[in-house]
Amino acid sequence: MDHRAMVRLSKRMSLALRHEPGRFGLSPDGAGWVPLPAFLAALRIDRADLDAVVADNDKQRFAVERGPDGVDRIRANQGHSIPVDLGLESVSPPDRLYHGTSAPALDSIRATGLHRGGRHHVHLSPDVETARRVGARRAGSTVVLTVDAAAMARDGHVFHRSANGVWLTEAVPPRYLTT
Ligand code: HQG
């Protein structure tokens, strides 16, 4: 598979595991896992292609492991819009986290803070470079906001870190944000 084919397959896998499993005839369990044999059949791919995407994925979006029934299973590490409980523990965050977005969203973010939208959490990056890449997916010039995660944690906001290092929290009120 060339790089473009891998990106295309990664997007289909994300769609099936995070957003529209029903469209592929799949029903993830409560923690988001799908048995690998069913997943391969639903997406009409073979194990080698799947392993290539899982291993090479720039953001380690997927986890594959042996399930308690002895069957391999797969899930997305984060980013779901379907209801799943990833079972992530709450962890205390670094003092600062970052959020990349686009300039047109700034007024609204300054007024109401960061919202999770269709996802389960607001996604925050551990460093400016990563946040810039996330923000660059949007039209308009990229803006990186600094989140005072230390103050949020002091004030009782809960943070999780996904298996691929993305920081997650319910919402970020405007007072913790600076540009
Ligand atoms: C914006 C990708 C206006 C927010 C990335 C963002 C990430 C507001 C957009 C992961 C707002 C939501 C998540 C407000 C938030 N007013 N706009 N009050 N609050 N927004 O895609 O953080 O490739 O749901 O700034 O790499 O961009 O999917 O979130 O622009 O890790 O693995 O609303 O998705 O990972 O967009 O990206 P998203 P995100 P994957």
Image: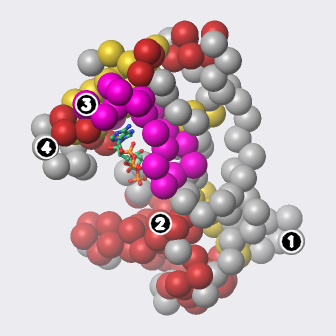
In the structure shown, which secondary structural element does the residue marked by tag 3 occupy? helix
Going by the numbered disc 1, the residue's amino acid type is Asp
Q: Which residue is mark 3?
A: 107
Q: Amino acid at mark 3?
A: Asp
Image-quadrant location for residue 132: top left
- The mark nearer the N terminus, 2 or 1, is 2
Q: Is residue 79 magenta?
A: no
Secondary structure under tag 2 reads helix
User: Given the image, on which type of amino acid does mark 4 rest?
Assistant: Gly
- Name the mark nearer the viewer: 2 or 3: 3
Can you tell me whether the CB of the residue at mark 2 lies under 8 Å from the nearest atom of ligand 1?
yes
The residue pinned by badge 2 equals: 14
Amino acid type, residue under disc 2 in the picture = Ser
Q: Is residue 126 visible?
A: no
Left or right: 154 in relation to 10: right
Vertical position of residue 177 compared to residue 2: above or below: above
Relative to 26, does residue 129 appear above or below in the rendering?
Answer: above
- Tell whether 136 sits left or right of 164: left
N-terminal-most mark, 4 or 2: 2
Specify which label sits upstream in the sequence, 4 or 1: 1
